[in-house]
Image (cartoon, grey):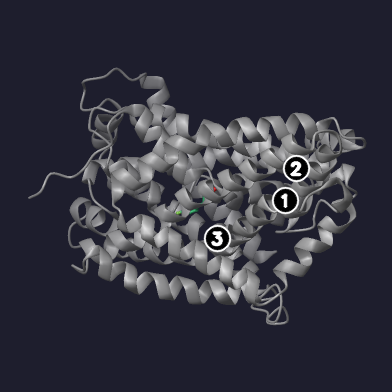
């Protein structure tokens, strides 16, 4: 059997996992779900969910992936031969493909905004036209569909290039640039007149805002942000060397992811208040506020502002691509490992199907805005279905599998790299308890309350 490729180093593992985790979820989705969820109180629930539910799922997926050294289908088959667990694999193919379809629409918007930045469309004179600019673009027919087409095609072409070369290179290059940019933007944003209100909104919790829906949404966001319950982390972990420390890689990735989201929140929300935009404005939020910041900045330093705008949309485009390639990779892994197709054949099936669903999602901001599924537009339905339900369900099954089906000894061996490294026993017991009890029960309770409410 051919030797499986592995990542070169710990830093490469964290960078590649962070490359998948950090994306539009942090920069686009986090600020607007915070806005819809009422600010600081939402963030507190989000942090609790990240710690008690998301981290255990992250570790559970990593444990399964590295133990089995295979994609979800084969991993389940190896670890629980002949059982129905194999079908969990199906979920990990379907969910990422639904996600990548609507994700690609937002990736397409980022592409359009990069073009706008390149053509200097966010000058100081444009402050009043920036919010309508987004609405007009997103609700039109051809522009967004074309941009989505570009994005999903680029994703699939990169996936064709293979695991190590494509993904590692991309992640390594752009993450630090993006981080520096959003820090700069954040510093500028909080200095805008009226921005203080936005900072207070993020720091002063109003606990009356916490409802069952807000808890479910915070949980969904913490799963979405770390790419959980859909097997992408599992696949990355399967490429990890046996001597790599799972726990610190997981913690490192989660920490990176959280930092990005928080900084993005502190860049966007102050600008939302300074610009007088409604925080619950929904998926268009960053496209309405970021250009506003650039326009304001442009009054004092036009070239600096134009450069930051271009780099910002360029780097989020790349961050979005590194995430979307991990989703398409999930489908490719299934079709090649399970169905014996070549990568090329696999892509030729995945590209048209994700493209078509993406087109429907894109049109749901315009011509199809009246089409509702269970009260949601097509875009919202795909988004909520995956983050609040399918990812949570996947996460539930992964933690249940590790906690109840795998031997505790196997889990210990993964944490200690087969006894070659030390791991604190008390910490292990705590983490194991979270995986076995807290995460599965927590998810079930949130599921049930959400359904009942
Ligand atoms: N975690 C990614 C983000 O924050 O943008 C989104 C994502 C990637 C979700 C990969 C699911 C996935 F499989």
Q: Earlier in the sequence, mark 1 or mark 2?
A: 2
Q: Nearer the viewer, residue 108 or 271?
A: 108
Vertical side of 15 occupied by 359: above or below: below
Q: Residues within 10 Å of mark 3 (few under 14, many from 20)?
A: many
Q: Can you identify the residue that label 3 sits on?
A: 103
Vertical side of 414 occupied by 232: above or below: below
Q: Quadrant of residue 359?
A: bottom right
Give the side of residue 203 with respect to residue 264, left or right.
right
Q: CA distance from mark 2 to mark 3?
A: 20 Å
Q: Are marks 2 and 3 in contact (CB under 8 Å)?
A: no
Q: Are marks 1 and 2 in contact (CB under 8 Å)?
A: yes
Secondary structure beneath dot 3 equals: helix
Q: Quadrant of residue 193?
A: top right
Q: CA distance from mark 1 to mark 2?
A: 7 Å
Q: Can you identify the residue that label 2 sits on?
A: 268
Q: Nearer the viewer, residue 302 or 203?
A: 302
Q: Earlier in the sequence, mark 3 or mark 1?
A: 3
Asked if the residue at label 3 sits under 8 Å from ligand 1, the reply is yes
Vertical side of 56 occupied by 79: above or below: below
Image point (60%, 44%), residue name:
26
Vertical side of 9 occupied by 330: above or below: below
Return the x and y of residue 149 as percentages of the image width and height: 51, 69
Q: CA distance from mark 3 to mark 1?
A: 15 Å
Q: Nearer the viewer, residue 347 or 75?
A: 347
Q: Earlier in the sequence, mark 2 or mark 3?
A: 3
Give the side of residue 374 with respect to residue 250, left or right.
right
- What label does residue 286 carry, if any? 1
Secondary structure beneath dot 1 equals: helix
Return the x and y of residue 142 as percentages of the image width and height: 63, 76
């Amino acid at each position: 059997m051919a030797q499986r490729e592995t990542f070169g180093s710990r830093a490469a593992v964290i960078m590649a996992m962070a490359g998948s985790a950090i994306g539009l979820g942090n920069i686009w989705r986090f600020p607007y779900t915070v806005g819809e969820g009422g600010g600081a109180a939402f963030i507190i629930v989000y942090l609790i969910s990240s710690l008690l539910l998301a981290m255990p799922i992250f570790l559970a997926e990593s444990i399964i992936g590295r133990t089995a050294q295979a994609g979800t289908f084969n991993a389940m088959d190896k670890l629980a031969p002949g059982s129905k667990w194999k079908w969990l694999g199906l979920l990990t193919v379907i969910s990422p493909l639904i996600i990548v379809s609507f994700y690609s629409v937002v990736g397409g918007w980022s592409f359009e905004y990069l073009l706008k930045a390149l053509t200097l469309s966010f000058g100081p004179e444009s402050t009043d036209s920036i919010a309508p600019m987004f609405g007009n673009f997103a609700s039109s027919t051809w522009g967004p569909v074309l941009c989505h087409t570009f994005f999903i095609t680029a994703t699939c072409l990169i996936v064709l290039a293979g695991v190590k070369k494509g993904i590692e290179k991309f992640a390594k290059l752009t993450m630090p640039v993006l981080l520096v940019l959003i820090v700069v933007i954040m510093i500028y944003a909080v200095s805008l007149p009226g921005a203080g209100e936005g900072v207070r909104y993020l720091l002063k919790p109003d606990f009356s805002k916490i409802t069952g829906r807000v808890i479910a949404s915070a949980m969904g966001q913490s799963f979405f942000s770390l790419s959980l319950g859909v097997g992408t982390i599992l696949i990355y972990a399967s490429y990890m060397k046996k001597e790599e420390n799972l726990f610190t890689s997981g913690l490192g990735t989660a920490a990176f992811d959280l930092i990005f989201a928080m900084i993005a929140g502190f860049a966007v929300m102050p600008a939302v208040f300074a610009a007088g935009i409604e925080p619950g404005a929904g998926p268009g939020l960053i496209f309405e506020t970021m250009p506003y910041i650039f326009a304001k900045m442009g009054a004092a330093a036009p070239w600096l502002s134009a450069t930051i705008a271009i780099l910002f949309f360029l780097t989020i485009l790349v961050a979005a691509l590194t995430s979307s390639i991990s989703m398409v990779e999930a489908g490719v892994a299934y079709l090649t490992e399970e169905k014996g197709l070549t990568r090329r054949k696999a892509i030729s099936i995945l590209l048209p199907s994700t493209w078509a669903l993406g087109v429907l999602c894109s049109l749901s901001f315009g011509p199809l805005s009246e089409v509702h599924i269970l009260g949601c537009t097509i875009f919202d339905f795909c988004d909520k279905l995956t983050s609040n339900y399918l990812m949570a369900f996947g996460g539930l099954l992964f933690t249940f599998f590790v906690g109840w089906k795998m031997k505790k000894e196997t889990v210990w061996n993964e944490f200690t790299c087969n006894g070659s490294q030390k791991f604190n026993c008390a910490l292990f017991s705590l983490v194991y308890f979270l995986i076995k009890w807290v995460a599965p029960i927590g998810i079930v309770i949130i599921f049930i309350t959400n359904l009942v409410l």
